[in-house]
């Protein structure tokens, strides 16, 4: 059994066949799917999907790409949505200095506001980081080890992984990139990450694992991620599924 800890199945890429996609995930042994919001609209859609399907859960948050356009009212809406029972975390939130769709200043402001809301409600966070360790790590360090969440789609090296693990109660989310032959850093992280810190994800519809690379990704393919990590760690895919599902439940407490 597997859990896909990071998907965007509420988004339009799945409008034509969402029911079939969710069924294929179940048939592939994916017992839970977390639908991640990137603004209020997609967070609400994730929560509605969670209402419709027993095995789907949601998060509420504003992605750094959307920080510039985020208003006080939108943050308040996210805060209210986060209190629904199947909304398990804030995010995805963070910093993205690769695409820079929003200014670093706007990104930091919206990130810190969401961190404060999550802390006030005692909820975990889903962190998006791209080329922004230099600012993300100090922000998390300033929380005095209270950071509680996942560094999703981790693509840094082993040293950065250890620095992330040192700033609080953080998990490392590994996705389809681990199946790419040239992803040496992610292979090393997949080998080295402590067993009780590892989560698996697809980040679908993007970043499909081999052999679907370049096509639309979907939660059923998380099994390919688990198989590759199991091979790298010299363990069985069953054991890998078991520990990552346990980690998911420890972090997100879906039965709260
Ligand atoms: Ni994502």
Image (cartoon, grey):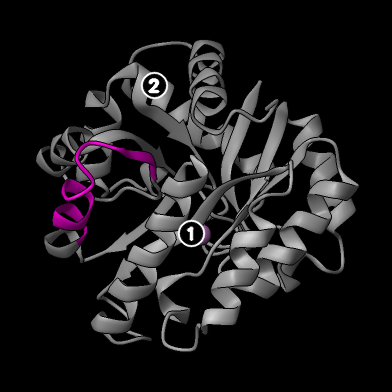
* CB at disc 1 and ligand 1 closer than 8 Å: yes
User: x, y (%) of residue 134?
Assistant: 11, 62
The residue segment tinted magenta is 136-150
| Quadrant containing the N terminus in the rendered view | top right
Q: Is residue 54 above or below residue 45?
A: above
**Disc 2 crowd, CA 10 A, few/some/many (<14, 14-19, 20+):** some
Determine the residue positioned at 40% across, 11% down.
235
Determine the residue positioned at 66% across, 30% down.
254
Label 1 sits on residue: 92
Horizontal relation, residue 8 to residue 164: left or right? right
Q: As rendered, which of 196 and 69 lies closer to the eye?
A: 69
Determine if the magenta segment contains residue 65: no
| Quadrant containing the C terminus in the rendered view | top right
Quadrant position of residue 31: top right
Label 2 sits on residue: 231
Query: Which of the two marks, 1 or 2, is nearer to us in this view?
Result: 1
């Amino acid at each position: 059994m597997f859990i896909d800890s990071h998907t965007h199945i509420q988004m339009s890429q799945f409008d034509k066949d969402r029911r079939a996609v969710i069924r294929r995930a179940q048939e592939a042994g994916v017992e839970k799917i977390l639908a991640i919001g990137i603004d209020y609209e997609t967070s609400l859609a994730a929560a509605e999907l969670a209402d419709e399907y027993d095995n789907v859960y949601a998060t509420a948050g504003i992605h750094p790409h959307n920080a510039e356009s985020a208003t006080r009212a939108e943050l308040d809406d996210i805060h209210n949505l986060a209190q629904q029972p199947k909304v398990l975390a804030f995010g995805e939130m963070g910093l993205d200095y690769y695409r820079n769709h929003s200014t670093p200043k706007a990104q930091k402001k919206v990130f810190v506001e969401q961190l404060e809301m999550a802390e006030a409600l005692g909820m975990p966070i889903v962190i998006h980081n791209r080329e922004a360790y230099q600012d993300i790590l100090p922000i998390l360090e300033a929380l005095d080890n209270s950071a509680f969440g996942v560094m999703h789609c981790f693509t840094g090296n082993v040293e950065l992984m250890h620095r992330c693990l040192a700033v609080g109660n953080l998990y490392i989310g590994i996705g389809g990139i681990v199946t790419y032959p040239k992803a040496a850093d992610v292979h090393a992280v997949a080998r080295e990450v402590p067993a009780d810190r590892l989560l698996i994800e697809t980040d679908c519809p993007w970043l499909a694992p081999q052999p679907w690379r370049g096509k639309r990704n979907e939660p059923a393919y998380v099994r390919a991620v688990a198989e590759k990590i199991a091979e790298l760690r010299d363990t069985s895919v069953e054991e890998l599924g078991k520990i990552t599902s346990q980690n998911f439940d420890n972090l997100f407490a879906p039965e709260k």
